[in-house]
Amino acid sequence: MPHDTPLITTIVGGLVFAFALGALALRLRLPPLVGYLCAGILVGPFTPGFQADTALAPELAELGVILLMFGVGQHFSIKDLMAVKAIAVPGALVQIAVATLLGVGLSHFLGWPLGEGVVFGLALSVASTVVLLRALEEYGWLDSEDGKVAVGWLVVEDLVMVLTLVLLPAFAGALGGGQASPSWGQLGWTLALTVAKVAAFVALMLIVGRRFIPWMLELIVHTGSRELFRLGVLATALGVAYGATQLFQISFALGAFFAGMVMAESPFSHRAAEESLPLREAFAVLFFVSVGMLLNPEVLLKDTAVLLATVLIIVVGKSAAAYGIVRLFRRSHHTSLRIAASLSQIGEFSFILAGLGMSLGLLSARGQALILAGSIVSILFNPMMFALAERYSRRAEAAA
């Protein structure tokens, strides 16, 4: 009896192909994520044969982002976040501005309108949460001072993108989209409302959440049920992330990050991180598969020169800006390289921004294709950037 099972088909197909090609990549001494991306291309709509559901895959991948940011939040306290704000806040803002200007410059050279250039540049400015955090964990940098700066930088980027996603529809008319331009009063109200929502969520988590969540975990532990504890951890991560999005219009990733930071107040936070690890890893793999599914291989052949310029902005231009900013704060050479390597790629927020730009009439199909292809190529290059930074760090430590 035939059954229509797109969810099962997408999960099974994505994981099976990812496992096979990830193992092959490892055999060829390549990072497994290269195999995961190639698996996505194979099961995507642009190649013949087996096809996964292109609507379900990104939603499954979002679960990986939530669980990953939740785990990071458990190792990143409020004190850590405040300790790096002096470099993370100005650093992220300046780096976003530089990358956006480079994107606008390339779009001007291509003859695109200003609005499309702004959306294109913004999409190239924000790093992927999943890629950055997995790399930091792999190299053991997550709990280091450099890792804390990178995570703080990432949080600031996420906050900026949350504001961008809210404000872009309001500015669409002024930037050349199909919508009417609002008044300055309307723009000011929209900005104030967005900031107020973010502040309200943070205050709620710090005042109520940091008392309630550890207390709830302690009650569950006293029941002696490991199954209920695991369920409580997952419910907290997913529930807070979903609530943050629905009630405060904050990204899933940012909501999960603050939930993890609040749970870190509990003495059982380490156990909570271990319980969520298997699902976190599985759904993180699905994230890379979903990214690969978005790539139309024709872009690599038809727009090679422009794609190369796009990748250079992401991998070289954005990294150089980050390196220079960190050096201005009198951090060491190898610390600057680590931060630069962390940010030399783009990911999930770029896809969301590109989709919004398309819906507002600001971004063309060509611009979206270049963003998607640039993301995949930059993710493929990212392990090499980390390897170079790690090699230099080891040499510097050996010479010291």
Image (tube, grey):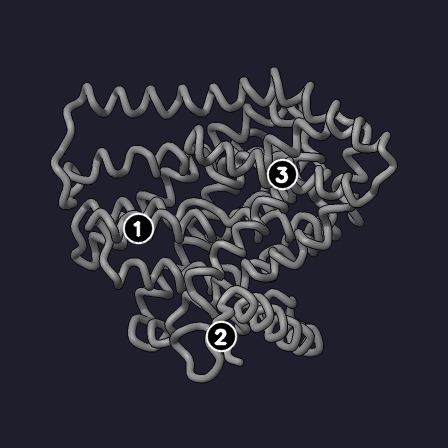
Mark 2 and mark 3: Cα distance apart in space: 29 Å
Q: Residue furthest front?
A: 1
| Viewer-proximal residue among 279 and 389 | 279
Q: Amino acid at mark 1?
A: Phe
Q: Amino acid at mark 2?
A: Val
Residue highlighted by disc 3:
237
Residue 271 drawn at (x, y percent) = 81, 39
Q: Are dots 3 and 1 in contact, CB under 8 Å?
A: no
Element assignment for label 1: helix
Going by the image, does 201 lie left or right of 210?
A: left
- Quadrant of residue 53 within the rendered picture: bottom left
The image shows residue 122, relative to residue 195, as above or below, that is: below
- Quadrant of residue 31 within the rendered picture: bottom right
| Quadrant assignment for the C terminus | top right
Residue 355 drawn at (x, y percent) = 32, 52
Mark 2 or mark 1, which is nearer to you?
2
Residue 106 drawn at (x, y percent) = 27, 54
Residue 37 drawn at (x, y percent) = 53, 68
Mark 2 and mark 1: Cα distance apart in space: 27 Å
Going by the image, does 34 lie left or right of 41?
A: right
Residue highlighted by disc 1:
120
Q: Residue at x 54, y 73 (%)?
A: 39
Q: Residue at x 72, y 54 (%)?
A: 278
Q: Amino acid at mark 3?
A: Ala
Closer to the chain start, of discs 2 and 1, is: 2
Mark 3 and mark 1: Cα distance apart in space: 32 Å
Q: Are dots 2 and 1 in contact, CB under 8 Å?
A: no
Q: Residue at x 54, y 47 (%)?
A: 129
Residue highlighted by disc 2:
43
